[in-house]
């Protein structure tokens, strides 16, 4: 992982959430302050919004796409910035180099959750981040077999806070899962490359479909931040977000009519998986907060797998017709 990422040091953890939690708690103490993007994987948002404050670590959530909000949230005690890009489920981009410059100026460390981009398409350390975290459960395993996580950074960063936190608190990766994930790494570039090509083909086929109200794919020129995508990423993503006509009922009818694509909250798998964020990953948020996050009732998130793109497109079009 260190070689793929261009990092000096790396540590493996039992899950992606263990990696995120360690990357934050390993550097923080009571009295410190964290600035994080509002658009976070649900559990990451729980850690920042609910867990850290219980231990006297204040946090401010900002609109991740606004550099002004990152700047305005800085306090004397700000020690860590945390973001993911592209974000779940709306695939917004956060300007990593821009946020890194603000972090550097105030002496804070920037942690980037790079799960959606994968180590193939985005290198946060080269863009100025101090730490990159992964859920290896996703593309790194890529076959739905086990959980895992990775924390990467400079040798000094890992040895200062992360190493002893991991050693003393026990979120270790099991040897068997380490072996499974290493087998996953052997094919990671092949899988992610093909899944990204498939996602691009599927996104192009669905973008003009009359039953699709809005489609977001970072590899398309109509992505709202297409210029930033070109600057920050080497390719789109294996994920597509789109809004099905007919709200929640329309989305459910569509998902239930799929025959190849499976309903699951996992992503990055060799099998195509679809999820309805409003009733799963983002269910705990009140409807008005969900709306503000762009998680509408008709929105679905599709993780494109290794099936033939023509089969996938036929399956998706058939289900949209239903
Ligand atoms: C899945 C995921 C996590 C958490 O990973 P687990 O391995 O499930 O604990 C964190 N961040 C993002 C963006 C994810 O997709």
Image (cartoon, helix red, strand yellow):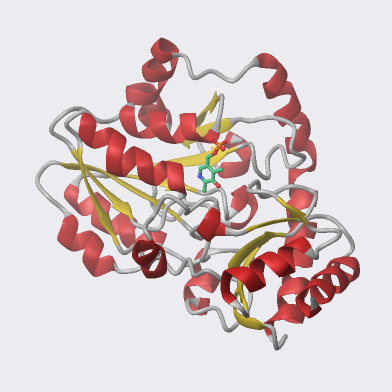
Residue 229 x, y percent position in the rendering: 53, 70
**Residue at the far top in the pictured view:** 168
Q: Residue at x 40, y 32 (%)?
A: 21
Residue 165 x, y percent position in the rendering: 37, 19
Q: Residue at x 57, y 35 (%)?
A: 2
Ligand 1 image-quadrant field: top right
Q: Residue at x 54, y 40 (%)?
A: 134
Residue 150 x, y percent position in the rendering: 54, 33
Q: Camera-side residue: 23 or 290?
A: 290
Number of residue marks: 0
Quadrant, the C terminus: bottom right
Q: Is residue 80 above or below residue 96?
A: above
Taking the image as shown, residue 205 lies to the left or right of residue 72, namely right
Taking the image as shown, residue 97 lies to the left or right of residue 266, namely left
Q: Is residue 34 above or below residue 224?
A: above
Residue 13 x, y percent position in the rendering: 54, 25
Q: Camera-side residue: 302 or 248?
A: 248
């Amino acid at each position: 992982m260190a070689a793929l990422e261009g990092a000096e040091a790396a540590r493996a953890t039992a899950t992606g959430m263990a990696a995120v939690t360690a990357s934050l708690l390993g550097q923080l103490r009571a009295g410190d302050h964290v600035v994080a993007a509002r658009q976070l994987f649900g559990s990451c948002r729980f850690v920042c919004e609910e867990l850290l404050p219980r231990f006297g670590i204040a946090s401010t959530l900002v609109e991740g796409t606004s550099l002004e909000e990152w700047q305005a949230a800085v306090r004397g005690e700000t020690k860590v910035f945390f973001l993911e890009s592209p974000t779940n489920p709306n695939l917004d981009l956060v300007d990593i180099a821009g946020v890194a410059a603000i972090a550097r100026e105030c002496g804070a460390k920037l942690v980037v959750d790079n799960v959606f981009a994968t180590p193939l398409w985005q290198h946060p350390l080269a863009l100025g981040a101090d730490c990159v975290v992964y859920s290896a459960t996703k593309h790194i395993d890529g076959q739905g077999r086990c959980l895992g996580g990775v924390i990467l950074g400079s040798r000094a960063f890992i040895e200062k806070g992360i190493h002893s936190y991991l050693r003393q608190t026990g979120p270790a990766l099991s040897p068997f899962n380490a072996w499974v994930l290493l087998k996953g790494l052997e094919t990671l570039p092949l899988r992610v490359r093909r899944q990204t090509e498939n996602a691009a083909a599927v996104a192009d086929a669905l973008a003009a479909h009359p039953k699709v109200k809005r489609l977001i794919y970072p590899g398309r020129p109509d992505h709202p931040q297409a210029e930033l995508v070109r600057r920050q990423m080497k390719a789109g993503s294996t994920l597509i977000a789109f809004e099905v006509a007919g709200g929640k009922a329309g989305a459910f009818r569509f998902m239930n009519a799929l025959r190849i694509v499976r309903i699951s909250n996992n992503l990055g798998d060799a099998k195509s998986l679809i999820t309805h964020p409003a009733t799963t990953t983002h269910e705990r948020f009140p409807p008005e907060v969900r709306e503000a996050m762009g998680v509408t009732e008709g929105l679905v998130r599709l993780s494109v797998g290794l099936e033939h793109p023509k089969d996938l497109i036929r399956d998706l079009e058939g289900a949209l017709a239903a």
